[in-house]
């Protein structure tokens, strides 16, 4: 039972209807009473938890890139939250409980900058890959010194390798040496472009591209 001492519009203590009145740090606070969940583990809830777990795992593999790639959005939501929301909705596929992350649909970034074009991925030397692309400088906002950020992800989505060397749009090619343990793995290469003035955070969506699959390869 709630006790109202200051009239119907005043502060109160205790429960009345669907709210509880209390005093906290000298302030009058009302809290909503949430309904009782009689079955907190329905199939739909299990499916949503698994989608969350899979998307969270993908994001964790690529957290350094995602925090740049989804940083161009305005508002208070973090890059991690933007990426998690997108990948839960779009990248987790299949019929429950056989859900997987489809790396062809997953995103490391979102924005309006142009990505590189016509990428080709190959592996001719042990534990390394080569990527070739067309320099599309001048298309839209694309500039020659835009940086290209890359993640090489094994198709099982359990491991990712992110090269730290500076790669620019104008380079048109790069060779990435991987740890010896990657030899024989099948991998998908995801990447995106950022404006050359971006360091840890994009100022807007104009400074980062949507990520794209650059290619799939069996590493020699």
Image: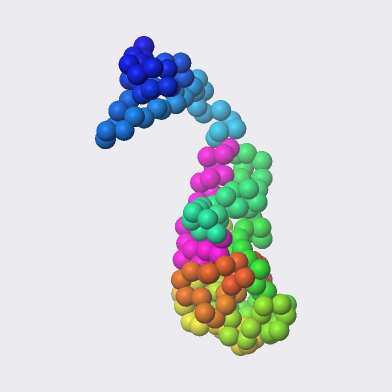
Residue at 62% across, 58% down: 106
Stretch of the chain drawn in magenta? 47-73
Residue at 35% across, 16% down: 4
**In this picture, residue 93 sits left or right of residue 73:** right
Corner quadrant of residue 6: top left
SS assignment for the magenta stretch, majority: helix
Q: Is residue 148 above or below residue 44?
A: below
Q: Is residue 79 above or below residue 144?
A: above
Q: Tell which residue pokes out farthest to the left in this image.
A: 25
Q: Nearer the viewer, residue 46 or 171?
A: 171
**In this picture, residue 7 sits left or right of residue 131:** left
Q: Is residue 115 above or below residue 57?
A: below
User: Magenta stretch containing residue 128, yes or no?
Assistant: no
Is residue 12 among the parts visible in the rendering? yes
Q: Nearer the viewer, residue 214 or 182?
A: 214
Residue at 62% across, 43% down: 98
Q: Tell which residue pokes out farthest to the front in this image.
A: 7
* Percent position of residue 160, x then y: 50, 65
């Amino acid at each position: 039972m709630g006790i109202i001492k200051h009239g119907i519009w005043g502060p109160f203590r205790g429960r009345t209807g669907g709210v509880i009145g209390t005093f906290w740090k000298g302030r009058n606070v009302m809290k909503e009473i949430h309904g009782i969940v009689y079955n907190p583990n329905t199939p739909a809830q299990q499916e949503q938890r698994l989608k969350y777990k899979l998307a969270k795992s993908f994001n964790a593999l690529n957290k350094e890139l995602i925090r740049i790639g989804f940083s161009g959005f305005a508002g208070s939501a973090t890059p991690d939250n933007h990426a998690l929301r997108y990948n839960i909705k779009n990248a987790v596929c299949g019929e429950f409980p056989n859900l997987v992350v489809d790396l062809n649909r997953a995103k490391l970034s979102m924005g309006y900058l142009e990505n590189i074009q016509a990428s080709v991925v190959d592996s001719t030397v042990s534990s390394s890959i080569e990527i070739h692309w067309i320099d599309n400088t001048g298309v839209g906002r694309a500039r020659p010194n835009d940086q290209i950020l890359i993640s090489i992800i094994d198709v099982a989505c359990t491991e990712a390798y992110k090269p730290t060397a500076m790669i620019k749009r104008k380079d048109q090619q790069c060779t990435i040496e991987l740890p010896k343990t990657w030899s024989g793995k099948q991998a998908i290469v995801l990447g995106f472009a950022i404006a050359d003035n971006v360091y840890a955070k994009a100022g807007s969506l104009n400074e980062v591209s949507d990520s794209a699959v650059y290619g799939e390869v069996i590493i020699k």
